[in-house]
């Protein structure tokens, strides 16, 4: 038994403006708990979370010298922090406050059974009181944090994040798997909505990176391992070499590309072109030097003969460990790759994807050709790999309607005789992007629409591909569109080759993108403290949305590590090392890897890493020798709560008194309600005092629009103030009268 | 089965005013039309956009039934010049069928 039981508990029961008190009789709850051991004061309030109520509580605690408090209101998810703050302001330790949820768990869940709802509320509040009696004063755990961040992925998201974190004084390691930075943005040529060039955007960001001394960029870098925890992660990274050890100017590079005999599909151009084993993604890609692809190189030695090439084919990979306080994941997405035969992909030779089309357009010069044939009519088939009724990808990729339409605008401004046919499932050029759509209709683009019930079919006839669809915009008329090139508007999907997620244990959502804690309220944090997500690795995003999430993750990471220390919840697991025999079962079970095996007094026992443990409690029941206790949910605390919960609830009054009270309550309510009526409601009642009237007659009488009168009259009817007489007047309108 | 004919619209009219492409198929015009044309106003536009010449000739009566009251034009959210487009269509039908 603990020594100092709380003696002066304040209990605050909230009405939640009727949300609770309409179903739970809060006065009864107050009565039923006022004699619980330790309770000094019980109060009911209309809105406990309101500023005025908070101040009242604080003053009450101080005046009466209370030592702890219980709040019975809504879910602690909503207001736990609010009332912890109240406790602190009142001079209490914030852990000497316990919360009971009597809204979600009582009034809302049991709105059809008010007596039982009240009974349950009494039990919940009693349990909270029993628990707070045993509560101890706890201090938040403070750990040291390195003001150093690792940013994984140097697309526009990672680049931007690095700049901002560096400017706030954080040391940044920017870790890019590819040998060049910029990610996918560099691939698209002109970007919506500004027509800025993607490569220029990347160049601008990279130059800013170079200007900052506290950013180190690693390319060809792969995450290998992770140790430690928030504030003090140890990230193992393997750096593949470039094999070019000194400066390599453009002329030398061109020569190298020429002499190298090894060739493969160029991934940057989605296989539309070939590249050599020595290559750059594109001419002005950064960092400036080319790289040697050792998977392709057969060490023929031709490149070594080029003067000033600075090539070293024997350069070895390096393994380094980075010690960082926070990790930001900005690893982006992959474009959806259609299955063979999906809308003619790979089976009809003039069917390509939107990413390929962007490369084709970006590289084309003078004439638009594909496979040596010139292109005039282009058909775009939308939502390929997104919004799949049967496939894996249920999501809308959000970027693609706009991107396809912007491609149509770009291609037409470059080649004016091109004609665009958009075969879509409803256009989603939301927000400011709608102007792209309007511009495209102005330039004469034709839109046809299909539903998921019948997808378009494709057939190659001669040089043309004929697309047949039922056009929803023309009464499902079967239409044939003839095209020189078919562009499949493919969506965004998670990275196929994802090695980091496994190593970092990042949670993956049902859509397979990285998962945040809470979509709305905590969109850039993961359940692992100190690991943040931003950009397209979290969900499909255009650059604007990518930046919004990037800057928010950056700010979150900065506020976590910049002060050099991190405060953590003290509600965690503790081990009684006298009992623990290190069987390792807890270690196997903990999803956060919070356990370590340590030696104490010559015996191996479990130890909990305070920075990792979430206090979830999963480990406590698995321990066969009962060595694990969760602070705040010890066996003793849980037992007294159960005792309090099962104790009989007896309401004092007899049945008759209750009935009487009910009717009294009713008239009271009606009077109260009448007083609370809006002006127009009162006028309607007045107008009906003399005689029964129809809605137009009341409207004319009180000089309010008839639709307003109708609306308020129906409310009055619902609350039992008026009723219809059952008769109609000469104009055939129903008449209403006051209800006695 | 109809074949989309993108060249048709050029033959039809090159006037700047002529803008059936701007239609978003909201149906406002069809809902408002006081005489309830056999083929709804938006469809008259749609046939022209898609170049469905057969349909236009099939529905030629509708193009002439229109009162040119402009109720639709006033309310079209994308400023389609419906009534002037209808007149362009009449012009086309006159040329093509009635040879006037
Ligand atoms: C065809 C197409 C056209 C588009 N056009 C536009 C447009 O016009 N306007 C617009 O606003 N948006 C456009 N978008 C969307 C735009 O591409 C994305 O918003 C943007 O690329 C997201 O940036 P990111 O940095 O999050 O991801 P990415 O650009 O994908 O960059 C991620 C980076 O992380 C690296 N990486 C991945 N895994 C690892 C790892 N394990 N370790 C280290 N590094 C890793 C990658 O190599 C890459 O460099 C388009 C998208 C497509 C598909
Ligand atoms: S943005 Fe458009 S094309 Fe892309 S998935 Fe959504 S609806 Fe389909
Ligand atoms: S389960 Fe219990 S006994 Fe086993 S290692 Fe963990 S704390 Fe020790
Ligand atoms: S309480 Fe949860 S997070 Fe903490 S050690 Fe136990 S299982 Fe792991
Ligand atoms: S009101 Fe305008 S946009 Fe709507 S259907 Fe008619 S023409 Fe089209």
Image (tube, rainbow, N blue to C red):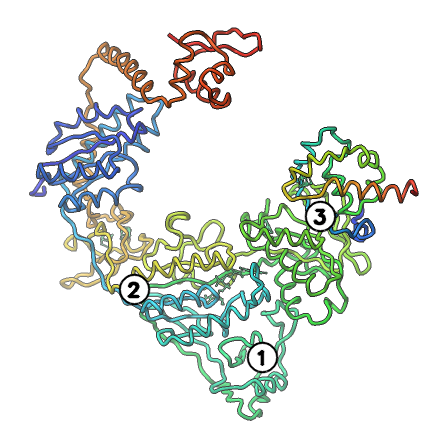
3 vs 1, front mark: 3
Residue A620's x, y, as percent? 25, 47
Determine which residue is flagged by label 1.
Answer: A277
When asked about the image quadrant of residue B77, the answer is: top right
Residue at 50 percent of width and 15 percent of height: A695
Q: In the image shown, does A217 or A302 lie closer to the viewer? A: A217
Q: Is residue A383 left or right of residue A59?
A: right
Q: Is residue A361 left or right of residue A236?
A: right
The chain identifier of the residue carrying mark 3 reads B
Furthest toward the right, the residue is: B99
Residue A287's x, y, as percent? 49, 77
Can residue B1 be seen from the camera position used here? no
Can residue A9 be seen from the camera position used here? yes
Q: Contact, CB < 8 Å: mark 2 with mark 1? A: no
Within-10-Å neighbours for mark 1: few <14, some 14–19, many 20+: many
Q: Quadrant of the N terminus of chain A?
A: top left
When asked about the image quadrant of residue A64, the answer is: top left
Give the answer, above or below, for where A38 lies relative to A492.
above
Residue at 19 percent of width and 27 percent of height: A30
Determine which residue is flagged by label 2.
Answer: A228
Q: Is residue A568 left or right of residue A417?
A: left
Query: Mark 2 and mark 1: span between their CA atoms?
Result: 38 Å
């Amino acid at each position: 038994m603990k020594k100092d039981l709380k003696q002066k508990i304040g209990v605050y029961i909230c009405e939640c403006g009727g949300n609770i008190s309409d179903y739970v009789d809060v006065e009864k709850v107050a009565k039923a708990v006022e004699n619980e051991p330790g309770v000094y004061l019980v109060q009911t309030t209309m809105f406990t979370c309101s500023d005025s109520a908070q101040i009242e509580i604080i003053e009450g605690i101080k005046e009466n010298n209370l030592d702890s408090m219980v709040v019975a209101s809504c879910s602690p998810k909503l207001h736990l922090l609010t009332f912890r703050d109240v406790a602190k302001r009142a001079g209490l330790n914030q852990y000497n406050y316990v919360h009971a949820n009597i809204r979600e768990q009582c009034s809302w869940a049991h709105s059809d059974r008010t007596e039982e709802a009240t009974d349950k509320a009494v039990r919940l509040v009693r349990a909270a009181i029993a628990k707070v009696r045993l509560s101890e004063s706890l201090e938040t755990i403070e750990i040291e944090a390195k003001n150093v961040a690792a940013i994984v992925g140097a697309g526009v998201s990672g680049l931007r994040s690095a700049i901002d974190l560096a400017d706030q004084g954080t040391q940044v390691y920017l870790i890019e798997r590819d040998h060049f930075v910029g990610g996918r943005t560099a691939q698209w040529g002109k970007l919506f909505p500004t027509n800025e060039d993607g490569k220029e955007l990347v160049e601008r960001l990279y130059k800013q990176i170079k200007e900052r001394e506290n950013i180190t960029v690693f390319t060809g870098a792969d995450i290998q391992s992770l140790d430690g925890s928030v504030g003090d992660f140890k990230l193992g990274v393997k750096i593949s070499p470039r094999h070019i050890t000194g400066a390599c100017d453009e002329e030398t590079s061109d020569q190298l590309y020429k002499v190298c005999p090894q060739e493969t599909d160029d991934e940057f151009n989605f296989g539309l072109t070939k590249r050599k084993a020595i290559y750059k993604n594109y001419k002005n890609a950064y960092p400036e030097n080319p790289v040697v692809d050792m998977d392709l190189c057969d060490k023929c030695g031709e490149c070594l003969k080029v003067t000033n090439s600075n090539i070293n084919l024997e350069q070895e990979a390096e393994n380094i460990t980075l010690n960082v306080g926070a990790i930001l994941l900005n690893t982006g997405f992959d474009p959806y790759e259609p299955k063979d035969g999906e809308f003619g992909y790979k089976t009809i030779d003039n069917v390509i994807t939107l990413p390929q089309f962007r490369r084709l357009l970006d590289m084309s010069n003078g004439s638009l050709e594909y496979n040596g044939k010139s292109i005039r009519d282009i058909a775009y088939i939308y939502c390929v790999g997104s919004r799949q009724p049967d496939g894996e990808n249920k999501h809308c990729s959000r970027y693609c309607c706009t991107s396809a339409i912007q491609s149509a605008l770009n291609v037409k401004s470059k080649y004016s005789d091109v004609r665009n046919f958009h075969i879509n499932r409803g256009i989603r050029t939301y927000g400011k992007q709608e102007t792209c759509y309007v511009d495209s209709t102005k330039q004469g683009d034709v839109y046809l629409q299909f539903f998921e019930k019948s997808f378009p079919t494709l057939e190659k006839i001669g040089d043309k591909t004929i697309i047949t669809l039922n056009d929803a915009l023309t009464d499902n008329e079967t239409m044939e569109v003839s095209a020189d090139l078919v562009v499949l508007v493919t969506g965004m999907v998670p990275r196929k080759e994802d090695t980091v997620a496994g190593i970092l244990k990042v949670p993956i959502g049902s859509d397979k993108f990285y998962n945040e804690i809470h979509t709305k309220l905590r969109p850039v944090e993961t359940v692992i403290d100190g690991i943040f997500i931003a950009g397209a690795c979290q969900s499909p995003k255009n650059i604007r949305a990518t930046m919004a999430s990037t800057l928010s993750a950056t700010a979150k990471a900065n506020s976590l590590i910049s002060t050099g220390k991190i405060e953590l919840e003290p509600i965690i697991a503790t081990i009684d090392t006298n009992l623990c025999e290190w069987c390792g079962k807890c270690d196997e079970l903990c999803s956060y890897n919070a356990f370590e095996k340590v030696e104490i007094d010559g015996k191996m026992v479990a130890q909990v890493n305070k920075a990792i443990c979430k206090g979830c409690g999963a480990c406590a029941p698995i321990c066969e020798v009962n060595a694990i206790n969760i602070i705040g949910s010890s066996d003793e605390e849980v037992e007294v709560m159960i005792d309090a919960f099962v104790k009989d609830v007896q309401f004092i009054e007899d049945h008759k008194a209750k009935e009487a009270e009910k009717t009294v309550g009713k008239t009271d309510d009606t009077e109260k309600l009448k007083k609370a009526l809006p002006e127009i409601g009162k006028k309607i009642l007045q107008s009906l005092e003399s005689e029964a009237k129809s809605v137009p007659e009341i409207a004319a009488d009180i000089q309010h629009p008839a639709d307003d009168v109708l609306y308020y009259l129906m409310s009055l009817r619902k609350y039992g103030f008026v009723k219809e007489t059952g008769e109609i007047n000469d104009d055939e309108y129903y008449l209403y009268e006051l209800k006695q | 089965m109809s074949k989309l004919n993108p060249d048709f619209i050029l033959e039809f009219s090159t006037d700047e005013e002529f803008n059936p492409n701007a239609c978003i198929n909201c149906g406002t015009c069809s809902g408002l039309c006081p005489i309830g044309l056999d083929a709804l106003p938006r469809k008259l536009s749609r046939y022209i956009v898609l170049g469905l010449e057969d349909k236009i000739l099939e529905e030629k009566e509708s193009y002439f039934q229109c009162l040119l009251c402009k109720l639709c034009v006033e309310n079209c959210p994308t400023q389609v010049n419906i009534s002037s487009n209808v007149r362009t269509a009449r012009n086309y039908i006159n040329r093509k069928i009635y040879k006037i």
